[in-house]
Image (tube, grey):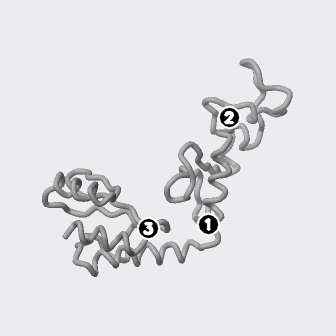
């Protein structure tokens, strides 16, 4: 997303799943002119004007930059997230999108009805089920992770999924 071109005021994303990171970290962009409107709920020691000197007490002087929103670092999460972002950057968003579309096409070619217009598809799919409980039991036996929501199978494909997995899923779904 080109935040300047799109006119984005604020954008938040969790780091896990689509960004190949771990739970516990996220990313926040705030247009510079709006940063003063954001008040930190639980600022960490790095949120102060002088992190190594002033971080105790109720009169903590917050940074005038976006770092005022920093919380205490989950020490190992950033290392994992950097590696995930490297994979995404090396692969390229276009290649990932093409991969995800090809995985969904695998399901369609095997007779699974995908109820969305191909031009507007997300890699998150919601597939109508006949017997949700029987389907989930069959998926568990095959060690396929998915969930049922409102009687529909919810799956999300991404770079870490393979064509063999789609074949296996289609076989279970019949």
Numbered disc in front, either 2 or 3 = 3
Residue that protrudes farthest toward the left in the picture? 130
Residues 135 and 21: in front is 135
Numbered disc in front, either 2 or 1: 1
Quote the CA–CA distance across marks 2 and 3: 33 Å
**Residue appearing at x 59%, y 60% in the figure:** 7
Residues at discs 2 and 1 in contact (Cβ within 8 Å)? no
In-image side of 170 versus 49 (left or right)? left
Question: How many residues crowd around disc 3 within 10 Å: few (fewer than 14), some, or many (20 or more)?
Answer: few
Q: CA distance from mark 3 to mark 1?
A: 14 Å
Q: Residue 87: which numbered mark, if any? A: 1
- As helix, strand or loop, the secondary structure at mark 2 comes to loop
Residue located beneath label 2 in the image: 72
Picture coordinates of residue 160 (x, y %)?
Answer: 48, 66
How far is disc 2 from disc 1 in space, using C-alphas? Answer: 26 Å
Q: Residue at x 26, y 51 (%)?
A: 149
Image quadrant for the C terminus? bottom left
Q: Quarter holding the N terminus?
A: bottom right
Residue 39 in view, yes or no: yes
**Could you tell me which residue is drawn at 30 percent across and 74 percent down?**
107
**Which sits earlier in the primary sequence, circle 2 or circle 3?**
2
Please say if the residues under marks 3 and 1 sit with CB atoms less than 8 Å apart: no
**Residue corresponding to mark 3:** 161
Q: How far across and down, in percent of the image, does residue 51 sit? A: 81, 33
The x and y percentages for residue 144 are 33, 59
The earlier-in-sequence mark between 3 and 1 is 1
Quadrant for residue 153, please give it.
bottom left
Residue 160, compared with residue 136, is above or below; it is: below
Instruction: Classify residue 27 as left or right of residue 112.
Output: right
Mark 2 or mark 1, earlier in chain: 2
């Amino acid at each position: 997303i080109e935040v300047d071109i799109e006119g984005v005021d604020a954008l938040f994303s969790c780091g896990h799943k689509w960004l190949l990171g771990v739970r516990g970290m996220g990313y926040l962009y705030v247009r510079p002119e709006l940063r003063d409107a954001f008040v930190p709920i639980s600022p960490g020691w790095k949120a102060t004007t002088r992190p190594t000197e002033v971080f105790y007490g109720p009169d903590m002087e917050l940074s005038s930059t976006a770092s005022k929103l920093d919380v205490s670092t989950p020490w190992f999460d950033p290392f994992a997230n950097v590696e995930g972002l490297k994979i995404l950057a090396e692969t390229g968003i276009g290649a990932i999108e093409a991969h995800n579309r090809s995985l969904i096409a695998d399901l369609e070619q095997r007779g699974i009805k995908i109820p969305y217009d191909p031009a507007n598809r997300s890699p998150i799919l919601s597939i109508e089920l006949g017997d949700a409980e029987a389907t989930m039991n069959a998926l568990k036996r095959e060690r396929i992770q998915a969930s049922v929501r409102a009687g529909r199978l919810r799956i999300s494909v991404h770079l870490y999924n393979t064509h063999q997995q789609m074949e296996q899923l289609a076989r279970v779904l019949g």
